[in-house]
Image (cartoon, rainbow, N blue to C red):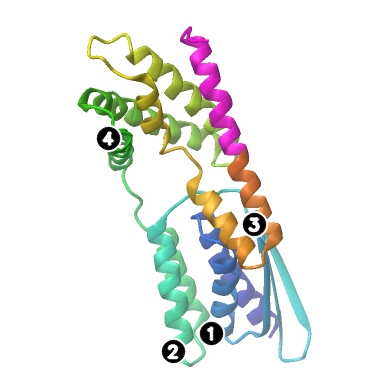
Amino acid sequence: MIEDVQDIQDIAVTAGEIVLENGGETYRAEDTVVHIATALGAKDSSAFITPTVVIFSCMDDGGTHHTVMRRITRRGTNMLKLSQMNELSYRLVNRGTTSNPAQVRTLLRRIIDAKEYSYTFLVLMGALSSAFFTFMLEGNIFDAIASFIIGALTRVIMIFFNDILSGKNSFILSLICGAFISFSSEVSAFLPAGISPPLVLGGSIMQVVPGLAFVNGVRDVISGDLVSGGARLLEALMTAMGLSIGSVAGMYLAGVL
C-alpha cells in the first residue's frame, strides 16, 4: 500500500507543480492537488502551497500519514496548460469513481508536453500588444510603429534571457527589459517622424508589467492565503522596481538624464 500512496503523492504534487509553473493562483493549485489525490483514492488529503513549494499529505489504509514536498523553481504564464489542468481536475472529480493512477499520469504528461506557442508567434503578439497599447495612450501611427519594433525586440530579449536565467530571476529580466525599452524609446525621438518617446515607452513596457503576478497576489490574499499572497505581491513589486531602475538607466544611457 505504501507504494500506492507514494504514487498518488507524486501525481498530485506534479499537478500542483504544473499549475504553479504556468501562472496559476495558490488556491487553484491547492484545490487541484486535493481534487486529483481524492479522485485517485487518497484519504484525508491536504495541501499547503506557496509560490516556491508544494507540500502534500494524505493517509493510507493503516491510518499512517505520508507527506511529500517539492520545490518550485520555474514560474511563467501558460493559460492553455492552466485550462487543461482545470478541465482534468473537474473531470476526475465528477467521475465519481476512483481513477487509475497510470492513466492520470499519462494525461499529466500530455499537458506537460503540450505544444508551446512558437517564438515567432510570441514575438509577433508582443509587438502587436505594444503597438495597440500605444494607440490606447493616444499615440499616432508613427508612435505605434516604433512601439511595434521595440516590442518585438523586447520579446526576443525576454525569450533569450528567460532561457539563460531558467525563469528564476524576474528582477534581472525586468531590469534588462526596462533599460532596453527606455533607451530605444528615447533614441526613436531622433527619427524624422515626430515620435513621442513617453508614448512609445508606455506602450512598449506594458508587456513586461507584472499585472498577472499582482492580480494573483491580491486574489490569494482575499482567499486567505496570506503567505502566498504576500510573496506574489513582493515578487510583483520587485519586478516593478527592476523596470523602474532599468528605465532610468536607459534614459541615462540615452543622454536624457
Q: Quadrant of residue 189?
A: top left
Of marks 4 and 2, which one's residue comes earlier in the chain?
2
Q: Amino acid at mark 1?
A: Ala
Of marks 4 and 3, which one's residue comes earlier in the chain?
4
In the rendered structure, the answer to whether residue 79 lies left or right of residue 59 reads left
Q: Gap in Å between the C-alphas at discs 1 and 4?
A: 49 Å
Number of the label disc, if any, that sits on residue 39: 1
Number of the label disc, if any, that sits on residue 135: 4
Residue located beneath label 3 in the image? 229
Residue 125 lies, with reference to residue 254, above or below; the image says below
Q: Label 3's element? A: helix
Q: Which residues are magenta?
A: 238-257
Q: Nearer the viewer, mark 4 or mark 2?
A: 4
Magenta segment includes 245: yes
Return the x and y of residue 73 as percentages of the image width and height.
61, 49
Q: Amino acid at mark 3?
A: Gly
Q: What secondary structure is the stretch in magenta mostly built from?
A: helix
Q: Amino acid at mark 4?
A: Phe
Residue located beneath label 2 in the image? 95
Q: Are marks 2 and 1 in contact (CB under 8 Å)?
A: yes
Q: Residues within 10 Å of mark 3 (few under 14, many from 20)?
A: many
Q: Are marks 1 and 4 in contact (CB under 8 Å)?
A: no
Q: Nearer the viewer, residue 245 or 19?
A: 245
Of marks 2 and 3, which one's residue comes earlier in the chain?
2
Return the x and y of residue 34 as percentages of the image width and height.
60, 77
Q: Gap in Å between the C-alphas at discs 4 and 2?
A: 48 Å
Q: Residue furthest front?
A: 138
